[in-house]
Amino acid sequence: MTVDLDTNIEAGRPFMDAASPTHPSLTDPSLSLVDMFGITNVPYGVWVDESGTIVRPAEISSPPRDTPRDGGDPEAAARQARMLEQLPEAQRRVVRGMMKGGNRDPHRYANALRDWVAKGADSEFALSPDEVVERSRPRPEGAARAAAEFELGQHLHRAGHKLDAVPHFQAAHELDPENWSYSRQAFALVDDSMGKPYDTDLLTEIDRIGLDTFYPAADRL
């Protein structure tokens, strides 16, 4: 199952249509999976077995690439280069770091997932319940308050009170700064009618908080 974490239900439809998936493809506009499983960015994956038991908690789950690993897609690479050239040097450095973090072996996660599907609990990638708990993201008071602030911001934004939502989105980011699901959505919701409600942007925040928090490495993969 794949789930699009986006407050705009229609935003992911072109990608789903292009992929023509044969599995359930859903949209989670309230970002409830962020609170339930500790998802802090996309793409993230959670492994749940037939009994409903989590055998791997939320972690970066880069999909495999169909393009050759040595040359890649020349057109995509050219577009990427043009995009980078339009950014200030400080932001180019951040984007390069993000790309490096998100482009680890693109087949590693899929291969591990296939191994688990084939072998079940005997897979070397399946974790014990204690390991799952140990590797799951903590849920301190600050994270719980951040979730409440983000939900309140979403409610105000959906009701048309866009600028009133901004302080709550800011509070969510301040309370749980490494949860990029919140800030990515908040910045994505800004439109021309709002002016520039934030004194910062996503790339600046990633640089400030730490690149390693945006795409943290998955253990034992």
Image (cartoon, rainbow, N blue to C red):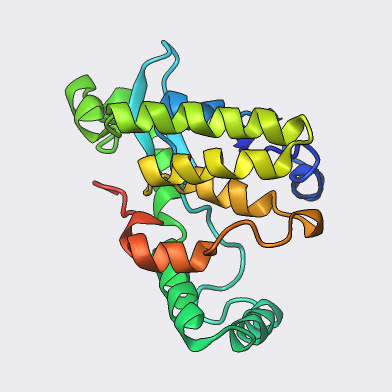
Horizontally, residue 135 falls left or right of residue 175, namely: left
- For this rendering, which residue is in front, 111 or 189? 189
Q: How many marks?
A: 0
Horizontally, residue 185 falls left or right of residue 95, namely: right
Q: Note whether residue 31 is visible.
A: no
Relative to 101, residue 17 above or below:
above
Measuring from the top left, give residue 82's x and y in whole percent.
Answer: 67, 86
- For this rendering, which residue is in front, 43 or 30? 30
Relative to 128, residue 93 above or below:
below
Measuring from the top left, give residue 14's x and y in whole percent.
Answer: 81, 49
Residue visible at 50% across and 78% down in the picture: 91
Measuring from the top left, give residue 80's x and y in whole percent.
Answer: 63, 79
Q: Note whether residue 193 is visible.
A: yes
Corner quadrant of residue 139: top left
Horizontally, residue 32 falls left or right of residue 11, namely: left
Measuring from the top left, give residue 103's x and y in whole percent.
Answer: 45, 66
Corner quadrant of residue 175: top left
Residue visible at 46% across and 77% down in the picture: 96
Q: Quadrant of the N terminus?
A: top right
- For this rendering, which residue is in front, 38 or 189? 189
Residue visible at 37% across and 48% down in the picture: 178
Residue visible at 44% across and 74% down in the picture: 94
